[in-house]
Amino acid sequence: MLTPEIPPRLLQDRLDAITEQTRRLVQAERLAPSERFVAELFASGAEERILPAGAKAPEFALPDASGRTVRSADLLALGPLVLSFFRGRWCSYCVHELEVWGEHYDDLRAARALLLAVSPQTVRQNHFTAAQHGLAFPVLSDGGATVAEQFGLVYTVPPALQRYYRSILINVPLMNGEPSYRLPLPATFVIGQDGLILFARAYADFRVRPEPAEVVAALP
């Protein structure tokens, strides 16, 4: 009897390694504010409030890392879209996810799909992100997380977690160019050329992301 092949978790295994290393090197009490907030965010039902598969995706126009405006309607005329919402370049989980997507970019292009990464960072910070990690796909600046809000992803970092971020030298207002501390849940959407969402996944736990192979399989 043949044993079914278990597909490799190319992305999640890398993210789990970050988590294991962090817990090994950082005292539990230092990580407690972040751990508490993840539990609170999950309990709030945040994952259930995102736009689901079958819903109409909002149209948007956002600047890329060079400042050029990218319009979703223009790109959907060329093929389906994969949207990857990420918190910022300060998030090691986010940049690892973007790097893995870079490794799978040819798979998307073979399926005639286009990938867009979206964060509330400034254009300048997204330029640093794209350059540092060698990203071949557009990285869009969603100021104030307004587009992320339309997808049902936005939360406000509470004061206790703001203090924690500052203690580890993460300056979210500087990165985002505004003081609101609004961030998106890490999320991935596949949008068909008719504008309908074909795949929707977001996580209250920033340490968890869908595998690119699962997302590619949702493409029409």
Image (cartoon, rainbow, N blue to C red):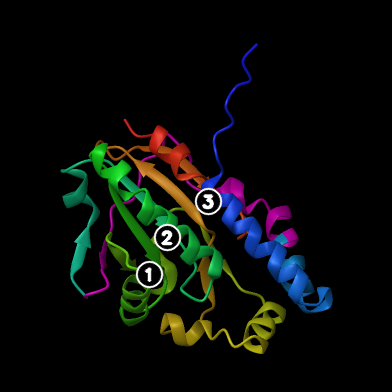
Dot placed on the residue nearer the N-terminal end, 3 or 2: 3
Res. 150 visible in picture: no
User: Where in the figure is residue 40, as x and y percent of width and height?
Assistant: 74, 61
Residue 129 magenta-highlighted: no
Numbered circle sitting on residue 98: 2
Q: Residues within 10 Å of mark 1 (few under 14, many from 20)?
A: some
Question: Which residue carries the number 3 mark?
Answer: 11
User: Where in the figure is residue 151, as x and y percent of width and height?
Assistant: 44, 53
Dot 2 and dot 1 residues touching (CB under 8 Å): yes
Q: Which residues are magenta?
A: 39-66
Q: Residue furthest top?
A: 1
Q: Residues within 10 Å of mark 3 (few under 14, many from 20)?
A: many
Q: Residue at x 59, y 31 (%)?
A: 6
Dot placed on the residue nearer the N-terminal end, 2 or 1: 2
Say above or below: 184 vs 111: below
Dot 1 and dot 3 residues touching (CB under 8 Å): no
